[in-house]
Amino acid sequence: MRLKQSAGRNPHKAFEDRRGRAVIVTYLQMFAHPQRVIPPPRDGLEVVHAKKPTIAYYRFLYDAVGRDYAWDSRKKLTDADLAAIIHDPGMKFTF
C-alpha cells in the first residue's frame, strides 16, 4: 500500500475541540490497492469491506471506534451530508 500526502495540502490540522482538548486530524489518501492480504488478528474475527454502509451502521461504528479519541466531527453532519461522503464511489470502508 502506498500512502502519499496530497499535493499542496497539509495532512495535519490542529485545533482545540469544544471541551478545550488539543486535537490533531491527519488525512491520508491511498493511491494503490494493497499488494498483500492481511490475515485476521485472531480466530473468530473477520475484516469485511462495507461496500455501501447504512448511515446507522456507519454512525454506530464511528462512535464505537472513535468515542475514546474525540471523534465527533461527523456526528455533527446531517444524514444527507454524511451519506454524500460515505456513499461517494471514491470512498471505501473496511471494518
Image: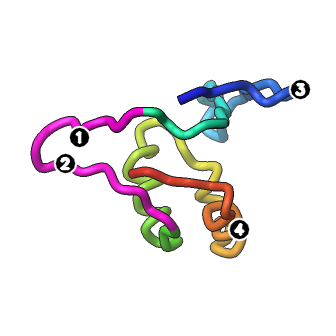
Question: Type of residue at label 3?
Answer: Gly
- Provide the secondary structure element on which disc 3 rests: loop
The three-letter code of the residue at mark 4 reads Ala
Which label was assigned to residue 8?
A: 3
- Position of residue 52 relative to residue 33, above or below, is below
Task: Please name the residue that numbered disc 1 is placed on.
Answer: 40
- Distance CA(mark 3)–CA(mark 2): 39 Å
Dot 3 or dot 2: first in sequence order is: 3
Left or right, residue 43 beside residue 94:
left
Neighbourhood count class around disc 2 (C-alpha, 10 Å): few under 14, some 14–19, many 20 upward: few
Query: Which mark is in front, 3 or 1?
Result: 1
Cβ–Cβ under 8 Å for marks 3 and 2: no
Question: In the orientation shown, which residue stands out farthest toward the front?
Answer: 35
- For marks 3 and 4, give the CA distance: 24 Å
State the SS at label 2: loop
Q: Main secondary structure of the magenta part?
A: loop
Task: Please tell me how crowded label 3 is: few (under 14), some (14-19), or many (20+) other residues with Cα within 10 Å.
Answer: few
Please state the horizontal and vertical placement of residue 35, each as a whole percent of the image: 46, 33
Marks 1 & 4, CB-CB < 8 Å contact: no
Q: Earlier in the sequence, mark 1 or mark 4?
A: 1
Residue 7, image x and y in percent? 85, 27
- For image coordinates 61% across by 62% down, the residue present is 86
Which residue is label 2 attached to? Answer: 45
* Span colored in magenta: 36-51
Q: Can you tell which of label 2 and label 4 is closer to the viewer?
A: 2
* Residue plotted at (21% across, 35% down): 41
Label 1 Cα crowd, 10 Å radius (few <14 / some 14-19 / many 20+): few
22 on left or right of 68 = right
CB-based contact (under 8 Å), mark 2 and mark 4? no
Quarter of image, res 78 = bottom right
